[in-house]
Amino acid sequence: MDILSDLKKGKRGAIAKAITIVENDQPESKKLLKKIFKETGKSMVIGITGPAGAGKSSLINKTSVALKKLRTKPAVLAVDPTSHVTGGAILGDRVRMTESTDSGTYIRSIASRGATGAVSRSLRNSIRVLEYAGFNPIIIESVGAGQTEVEISNIADITVVVFNPHTGDSIQTIKAGLTEIGDIYLVNKSDLDGTNQLFDAVRDFIGATERNPIILKTSVKKNTGITQFAKTLKDMMKEKQKSKEAKDRQRLETELKDIVLNNIREKMDDMLASDKTFSKYLKKLQSKDIDPFEAADKITKSLVK
C-alpha cells in the first residue's frame, strides 16, 4: 500500500483517503489497520461536547491554533449528525474552522450514522489513522446529541463540556448526563450576559463533586481564556498520560467484544436467511400457532448445538 509512506509524512491527501477507507468499513480498512495498528495508541484524545449552539466549532478553531503555539500537533475530528439524504456528514460547521486549517491543523467531519456503536467504530479507526500520521492531541467534537456524548467520553482521555449563557434553561440542561463526564467545563461566549451566574451554577453543581473538574470561562469573540484553556489541556495531557495505559487496556477489551459480537451477528443473519427451521417457525408464528418466545427458543436450540 503506497498510502502508508504518505500517511507517515502526514500528507493531507493520504490522511483523507485513509479515513474514507476506515469510515466505509471496506475490506481495505482491515488491511490498512493491520499495517498501522502497532504504531497507534500514543496520542491523547480530547472529546469536546456540549449543547448545540455552545460555540464549539469556533472555540476549537482558536484552541487548536493556541495548542499549536504550545508545540503540539492537533487534529480535529468532528462527529456530525448524518445527513439522511446522502448518508454523508453535514459540513456546515467546518466553515468556521478555516483559521486552524491554515495553521496546519487537520480537520475532518465524520458522519455519526445514527447507530450506537457505529460512531465508536469509525472514530476509533480514524483516530488511529491520525496517530500514525503524527498528530497529538486528537480533538473530537461531538454535535451534542445525547448518546454520542457518552460514546465519545468512553473514547476520550480528556472530556471537555462546553456551555454558553444563552442555552436557555442552562441549569436544567447541566443536570442531564453531562455532569458525570467532564474533566473540564467551559462557560464559552463569556462576553454575554448571564456568564457569571452560569459559571457559579456550574461550580456549585459540578465543581463540588469528588472528581473536582476544572471550570473556566472563554470567549472567542473577545479572544479571552483561550490560551489558558490550551495550557490547561496541555498540562492535563501530561497528567493523564500516566493512567492512559490502564484505560487503553480496558478500551481494547470493549472493542474486541464489540467486533466479535458484530461478526457473530452478521454470521447469524446469513444463517437465518437460509435456515429451514427458522422459516418453519416463522410461518407458525405468523399463523399464531406459536408465541414468539417459544419460536425463538426452538430456532436457537437448532442453531447452537
Image (cartoon, grey):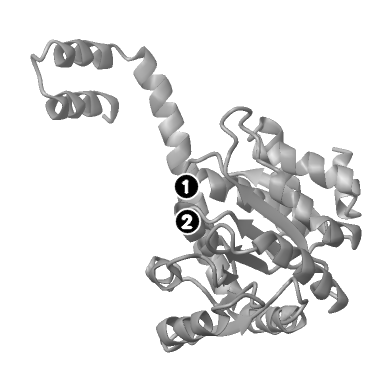
How busy is the neighbourhood of tag 2: few (under 14 within 10 Å), some, or many (20 plus)?
Answer: few
* Camera sees residue 69: yes
SS at badge 2: helix
Q: Residue 83: x and y, percent?
A: 60, 35
Q: Residue 155: x and y, percent?
A: 56, 61
| Res 172 → quadrant | bottom left
* Camera sees residue 253: no
Query: What residue is at 62 percent from the left and 50 percent from the top?
Result: 79
**Amino acid type shown at disc 1:** Asp
**Amino acid type shown at disc 2:** Thr
For this rendering, which residue is in front, 144 or 5?
A: 144
SS at badge 1: helix
Q: Residue 230: x and y, percent?
A: 74, 78
Which residue corresponds to mark 1? 258
As drawn, the residue found furthest toward the front would be 193
Q: Are marks 1 and 2 in contact (CB under 8 Å)?
A: yes
Query: Position of 147 compared to 98: left or right?
Result: left
Query: Position of 111 compared to 289: left or right?
Result: right
For this rendering, which residue is in front, 178 or 115?
A: 178
The quarter of the rendered structure image containing the N terminus is top right
* Residue 254, numbered label: 2
